[in-house]
Amino acid sequence: MKRCLPALVLLCCTGMTLAQPTGAQRLAWLQGCWAIDTPERTVEEQWMAPRAGSLLGMSRTVRGGKLVAHESVILRERGDRFDYEVSPSGQTTTVFSSTEVGSASIVFENLAHDFPQRIGYARSGTALDAWIEGPIKGRTKRIEYAYQRVPCGGTD
């Protein structure tokens, strides 16, 4: 019996470390600060850690030293899916519901919205690829954002 006890402890501990995250913790890969910095514009996006079944996010786009766009987002847990509630540049809030939830990716959809109708995120290492997609003038248009992780709380 003494020889079985260490094996049992190891088996139990290994099982605990392999537990999959649940709820909003499944989206912890999104948290942190992300940016695209080009000579034409800077786009920053920041996500708080999951808490109380939600993540809070915000973004801003700056061109020529001027704020040209901003938005706030609440990602809410809804059963095994998530709602993406976005308020872009002070406009009316729009809700998109997740259609795909992966271990480091998520896609949201609202086909009743004009543009975009789909929003997606996928993380790979220090890169976060985001995209929006939907119809414009009868054609499907996709706009991609290739973010890189940056330190939070930058300087002026």
Image (tube, rainbow, N blue to C red):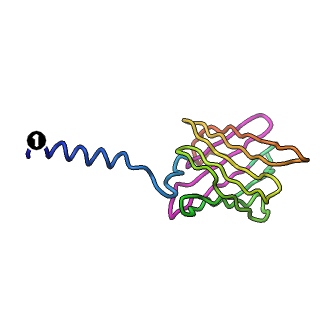
Residue occupying image coordinates x 31% and y 47%? 15
In the image, the segment drawn in magenta is 31-60
Left or right of residue 145, residue 128 in this image:
left
Above or below, 84 relative to 127: below
Q: Position of residue 95 (x, y in %)?
A: 70, 62
Q: Is residue 52 magenta?
A: yes
Q: Say which residue label 1 marks.
A: 3
Q: In front: 150, or 131?
A: 131
Left or right of residue 98, residue 3 in this image:
left
Mark 1 burial class by Cα count in 10 Å: few <14, some 14-19, many 20+? few
Left or right of residue 153, residue 90 in this image:
right
Residue occupying image coordinates x 54% and y 63%? 79
Residue occupying image coordinates x 30% and y 44%? 14
- The amino acid on which the numbered mark 1 sits, given as a three-letter code, is Arg
Q: Position of residue 5 (x, y in %)?
A: 14, 46
Q: Position of residue 133 (x, y in %)?
A: 77, 46
| Residue projecting furthest to the left | 2
Left or right of residue 112, residue 8 in this image:
left
Q: In front: 17, or 112?
A: 112
Q: In front: 5, or 73?
A: 5
